[in-house]
Image (spheres, rainbow, N blue to C red):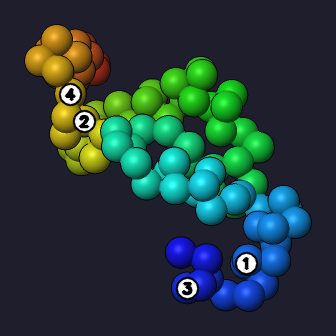
């Protein structure tokens, strides 16, 4: 909440120089797969639309085996697609 933030942060948010509280809250909402640019938000729209972070999540999963939080509520069809991608990637 606004009262828990440092005064400088509140001032910068109110001036529109950094991400608003409402926009920052989008970063913390399920499915946790977008709005990663939490300082200014300038790139969020383009990165969300291009699925940049989805691709990055897959890359990190392939490389390190760590499932992103956004995958916890996936439907079975998408999970199957991800598993197929993992099999293709591991064949190299």
Relative image position of residue 9 (x, y in whole percent): 73, 78
Q: Does residue 60 appear in this view?
A: no
Quarter of the picture containing the C terminus is: top left
Of 66 and 24, nearer the camera is 24
Q: Earlier in the sequence, mark 3 or mark 4?
A: 3
Q: Are marks 2 and 4 in contact (CB under 8 Å)?
A: yes
Q: Residue at x 76, y 43 (%)?
A: 42
- Find the distance from the CA under tag 2 to the CA under tag 4: 5 Å
Q: CA distance from mark 3 to mark 2?
A: 31 Å
Percent x, y for residue 40?
A: 75, 54
The disc placed on residue 9 is: 1
Provide the secondary structure element on which disc 2 rests.
helix
Which is more foreground, mark 4 or mark 1?
Answer: 1
Up/down of 77 relative to 64, above or below: above
Residue drawn at 12 percent across, 18 percent down: 76
The disc at residue 74 is 4
Front tag of 1 and 3: 3
- For residue 4, the mark is 3
- Please give the residue where the numbered disc 2 appears in the rendered image: 71
Tell me whether the residue at label 4 lies in contact with that at label 1, contact meaning CB atoms closer than 8 angstroms. no
Q: Is residue 61 left or right of residue 73?
A: right
Based on the displayed image, in which of its 4 quarters is residue 78 positioned?
A: top left
Dot placed on the residue nearer the N-terminal end, 3 or 2? 3
Element type at mark 3: helix
């Amino acid at each position: 909440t606004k009262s828990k933030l440092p005064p400088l942060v509140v001032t910068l948010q109110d001036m529109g120089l950094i991400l608003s509280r409402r926009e920052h809250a989008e970063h913390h909402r399920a499915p946790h797969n977008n709005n990663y640019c939490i300082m200014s938000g300038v790139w969020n729209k383009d990165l969300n639309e291009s699925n940049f972070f989805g691709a990055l999540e897959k890359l990190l999963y392939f490389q390190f085996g760590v499932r992103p939080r956004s995958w916890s509520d996936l439907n079975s069809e998408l999970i199957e697609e991800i598993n197929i991608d993992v099999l293709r990637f591991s064949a190299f």
